[in-house]
Image (cartoon, helix red, strand yellow):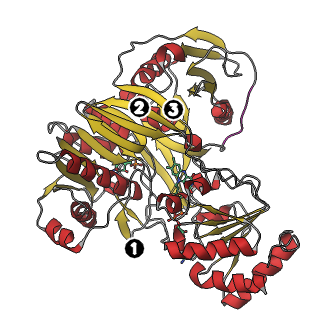
Amino acid sequence: MKKALLVAECRQGRLVADYAELPGFARALGSESSMVLVGYPEELPRFDGRLHFADAREYGEYNPDVHKRLVLRAVEAERPDYVVFMHSSYGWDLAPRVAAAMRAAQVSEVSGIGDGGFVTGCCNGKMRRTVRPLTPCAVLTLRQGAFHAERGGEPRCLPLEAEKAASVQLLRYEPPAGGGIDLSRAEVVVSAGRGVGRQEHIELVRALAEALGGEVGASRPVVDAGWLEHGRQIGSTGQTVAPSLYVACGVSGAIQHVAGMKGSGFVIAINTDRDAPIAEVADLLVAADLEQFLPVLISKLRS
Amino acid sequence: MKILVCVKQVPDMEGRFNPNAAGTWFDEAGLAFRMNDYDEFAVEEAVRLKERLGGEAEVTVLSVGPDRVIETIRKAMAMGCDRGVHVRDEGAAERDPWQIASMIAGYARSRAYGLVFTGMQSLDRGSAQVGVLVAELLGLSCATTAVGFSCDGGTATVERELEGGAKAVVRLKLPALVTCQLGLNNPRYPTLPNILKAKRRELVILTPDELGIEAPLVATAGFSRHERSGACTVLEGELDGLAARVIDLLDERTAVLRRGGGR
Ligand SMILES: Cc1cc2nc3c(=O)[nH]c(=O)nc-3n(C[C@H](O)[C@H](O)[C@H](O)COP(=O)(O)OP(=O)(O)OC[C@H]3O[C@@H](n4cnc5c(N)ncnc54)[C@H](O)[C@@H]3O)c2cc1C
Ligand SMILES: Nc1ncnc2c1ncn2[C@@H]1O[C@H](COP(=O)(O)O)[C@@H](O)[C@H]1O
């Protein structure tokens, strides 16, 4: 049976809940699993197996040189076929360091298993690839939400130690910028994506939101460009919304945007590209240029 | 200080993708290529750092790819990079991150860069590996997903973006490599005089072999269109009719029009 070493993570004093998708993946793969964590003794994963554990008070939370050494220690102890991370700010940072040290193949953002390899999205989610590692041990990062979470049991802790010299030092955390706009309770959200093209066209999105009695949201490039306030960004690094109606205007539907709106009721996308990945979560895609279509829709709604 | 910035040329994501004959990557026919979004932030940050340091600082931009990537190198030079390096590799699109990183590291190894900037990921493959692998191969300190950057003397301070938009402020010893996230800065548009100047800047052409390209660590076993799991209706046609159908559907499927929307 193949063996997977699962790398859990902690952030700002807490075990990150996503860790539970790691054992779910190991089960889907049909492999045995053990875990490694630099974390806190009072925040242990509910996992039935060996847990190679180092205390974050001693080794730091984000301390990549040292965490790499600790994970490599666990690799030595377990000799796994796979070392598996979540594709998170911790995982995409640490996984390639571990892979480089082992000269191991890495497959990023795995969302499925099949055809003798690992399935991963590419081209902004329009296409998919199946990738086969060519090294005896492979490093993987998992797409969030792609595998069932699995919790249960008590870990058997084995202490980990490593040298503490580090070239990177965590100074402090800062909270999200926010902006006092809470979109999480809005019944209708109309969001502007880069497809609006110009700042002036934000007014069309605003007018549609008004006509539908809703709030204005945005994708990241739109707030980065300063066309709308940061507090209106929807997605994995912005707000999560679940309105009964979500209208995405000129939003391609990148995974990080979809993460913040996939719980919406009815989803309408207005996009010139009928193949835009937003169609994955939309009920309706209006294949039209929003600059021409929105004025028509707004005037019909008003009359 | 010597600064290196790595840029990848990628297709516009709005294009239509079709598998190539081997079924391992996309066919380039009909696609428009441009600089990877994330790398624009990397170029801008490198140029800003040079401008702050003045005098001795110098920025080299490097791209691995076929001849079309020269256009992207020229754009980076028009944004302010001093010199360009083109690693001419017709097969670059299908190389794995380890191979690309081995070439970049092969170039940078003996050249004593104080800072290396890359994008956090490429839009087409999106592995988020190349930057970190280069740092590991060169023994540089490294932080990923930068949304803030400053540098003084022997250290750099980076704001790393975390889930939910929180940040971790970290300090790195130089030499260092930083992978850049969207929103790190406002990438400038090249002006016409700068575009013309860029044409006269030095562009060195090298081959993968000269840089010690390594063997691949992964193989692509399949490449295909992502089949949609949802049931999305696509509407096309004349605008008045489209608007009427959208309103009908809003009425059927949601309560918003009854609740007082639609005025
Ligand atoms: C770690 C990380 C976190 C991230 N967090 C977030 C996040 O929280 N939120 C977020 O939104 N993004 C986030 N991103 C960025 C994300 O990956 C995408 O880059 C972003 O969502 C793209 O925004 P967009 O859809 O507006 O732009 P694009 O992807 O450029 O899409 C524009 C769309 O508009 C369409 N279009 C163009 N012209 C017209 C027209 N005239 N009429 C109609 N349609 C048109 C195009 O066909 C295209 O589909 C994150 C990325 C990373 C790496
Ligand atoms: N062919 C390439 N030439 C130069 N830089 C590259 C190349 N491929 C990737 N990079 C750099 O590495 C980053 C991450 O790419 P990736 O690992 O493919 O997601 C990109 O944003 C670029 O800065």
- Front one among B70 and A130: B70
Relative to B251, B38 lies left or right: left
Q: Which residues are magenta?
A: A147-151
Comparing labels 2 and 1, the label whose residue is closer to the camera: 2
Mark positioned earlier in the residue sequence (2 or 1):
1
* Mark 2: secondary structure: strand
Identity of the residue drawn at 53% across and 18% down? A56
Residue B263 image position (x, y, % from top left): 79, 79
Crowd rating for badge 3 (residues with CA inside 10 Å; few <14, some 14–19, many 20+): some
Residue B77 image position (x, y, % from top left): 21, 61
The residue to which callout 1 is attached is B29
The residue to which callout 3 is attached is A173
Identity of the residue drawn at 21% across and 70% down? B195
The secondary structure that dominates the magenta segment is: loop
| B63 shown above or below A90 | below
Q: Are marks 2 and 1 in contact (CB under 8 Å)?
A: no
Residue A213 placement: quadrant: bottom right
Location of the N terminus of chain A by quadrant is: top right
Badges 3 and 2, same chain: no
Residue B153 colored in magenta in the image: no
Relative to A219, A207 lies left or right: right
| B5 shown above or below A79 | below
Q: Is residue A208 visible?
A: yes
